[in-house]
Amino acid sequence: MVIRREPMGAIGEWLEVAPADGQSCLALYPRSAMADWHEKKPSIVFECDDIDSTYAAMVENGVEFTDEPKAMPWGSYATFRDPDGNEYLLRAPRGEGAEIPPSTFPSENGRGPRDEPMGLAGES
């Protein structure tokens, strides 16, 4: 079942699907939302309530992050690696009632406002 649907401007929607009463979900979004989508692999995302404190605790425990938490229209994200170099995302959902400025979403060509590349978790 669809548990979340967020418009992403002209490129489409962010969808999260999960079984009823499930604690895990699958997030689907247009690959053009990532400037370098052709270089990316499928993502595994770990969700938390407070990304800043979770990030700090994970860093303190020796987890290697490739960037600090970054606020995006659909939540805050940070990318981390396991000892084998596989990348994962840490995510905190967007706060209830938070506004999503439409100019934050990439256009159909994968570019954002002022024609800058758009991406997740520290991408520029």
Image (cartoon, rainbow, N blue to C red):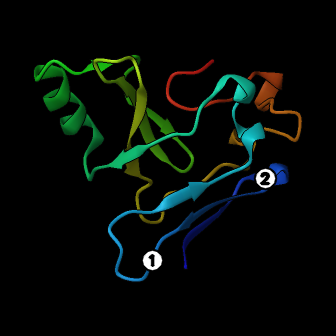
Q: CB of mark 1 within 8 Å of CB of mark 2?
A: no
In terms of depth relative to the viewer, which is nearer, 44 or 60? Answer: 44
Farthest residue, direction front: 84
What is the C-alpha distance between the residues marked 1 and 2? 27 Å
Farthest residue, direction right: 109
- Location of the C terminus (image quadrant): top right
Q: Position of residue 70 (x, y in %)?
A: 45, 31
Q: Which residue is painted at 45% across and 54% down in the image?
A: 94
Which label's residue is closer to the chain start, 1 or 2? 2
Residue type, numbered disc 1: Pro
Q: Which residue is painted at 47% across and 65% down in the image?
A: 97
Instruction: Count residues near mark 2 (Cα–Cα under 10 Å), then give few for <14, some for 14-19, many for 20+.
Output: some
62 relative position to 47: left or right: left
Q: Position of residue 66 (x, y in %)?
A: 40, 16
Question: Could you say whether the residue bearing mark 1 is in a helix, strand or loop?
Answer: loop
In terms of depth relative to the viewer, which is nearer, 83 or 89? Answer: 83
Residue type, numbered disc 2: Gly
- Location of the N terminus (image quadrant): bottom right
Q: Is residue 49 above or below residue 79?
A: below
State the residue position of label 1.
Answer: 19
In terms of depth relative to the viewer, which is nearer, 82 or 46? Answer: 82
Q: Position of residue 42 (x, y in %)?
A: 57, 39
Nearest-to-viewer mark from 1 and 2: 1
State the residue position of label 2.
Answer: 9
